[in-house]
Image: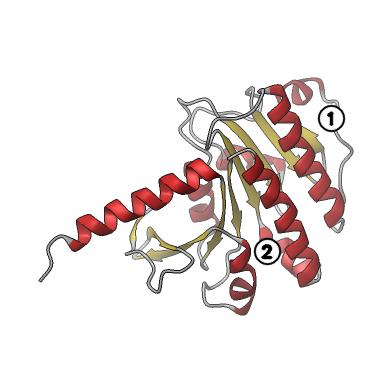
Amino acid sequence: MNNDRPENSTRTFRERLQTLKNQGCNLLITGEIREGVSQQLTRKMLGDPELSRTRILALTDQDRADVPNLLPSGVAATDDGVHVVDPEFGTRSATTTASGSRTDRGWGRSDLDDLQSALCNVITTAKIAESGFDPAELRVSLFTLSYLVNQHEPAAVERFVGAVSDHVRGTSGMAHYHLPLPDDSKTVRRLSPLFDARIELRETNGRPEQRWHFPGCEEPTAWVAL
């Protein structure tokens, strides 16, 4: 028995994760789980609240009332560096939320091009304001991709993901896109090649767990607690 395998696997995973952080990445989140589990992962993926981060939330089927459930503990929607893109209010930052004014016109839930423009514009604007980002400083969450998949043709969704992904990688940022479907579903298989890795979620006896799928690797990582 090779007792070094768990240690080697852990080291390999950490090396891959560090590479993703350094180069910028887009991650697909899959698995039929409770919304609360998806929210828990989002809080984790948006980064340590003690570190300087620019956080962008793009909401497609969530209300702004859900934003506190998506942000890390101690981070508020009114904080500097937090931006929310949603269909009802358009793109807002801390300053515009306080004043009630819009930084961008709202986009309709059915208008994918407007969502793409709004999201890419806020990434670009934040990059200029910060004079660029350090690797993994920009964190983006799309909650959820399911709504877009259900409302638009596959080719349109693929173009959207491709455009946003390019903007994220161009800032060495990290973005994750929630698609709460079985990991072996046809939709997941079709979209997976657009992403740098896939995080599959499940619950075992009420305990959220995750495992990662990396392109070119035959087997996913072991299941671990979220």
Residue 130 sits above or below residue 208 on the image: above
Residue 219 sits above or below residue 118 on the image: below
Q: Position of residue 105 (x, y in %)?
A: 89, 38
Q: Viewed as shown, does residue 64 lie left or right of 72?
A: right
Q: Nearer the viewer, residue 24 or 150?
A: 24
> What residue do we see at 65% from left, 38% from top?
56
Q: Position of residue 27 (x, y in %)?
A: 55, 55
Q: Viewed as shown, does residue 158 lie left or right of 222?
A: right
Q: CA distance from mark 2 to mark 1?
A: 26 Å
Q: Position of residue 182 (x, y in %)?
A: 53, 73
Q: Amino acid at mark 1?
A: Thr
Give whichever of discs 2 and 1 has the lower sequence position. Answer: 1
> What residue do we see at 51% from left, 67% from top?
31
> What residue do we see at 73% from left, 67% from top?
149
For mark 2, give the secondary structure: helix
Give residue 103's mark: 1
Give residue 146's mark: 2
Q: Amino acid at mark 2?
A: Ser
For mark 1, give the secondary structure: loop
Pointer 1 local density, CA inside 10 Å: few below 14, some 14–19, many at least 20? some
Q: Viewed as shown, does residue 115 lie left or right of 198?
A: right
Count every numbered label the image shows and give the total: 2
Give residue 67's mark: none
Pointer 2 local density, CA inside 10 Å: few below 14, some 14–19, many at least 20? some
Q: Position of residue 174 (x, y in %)?
A: 56, 44
* Residue 117 position by quadrant: top right
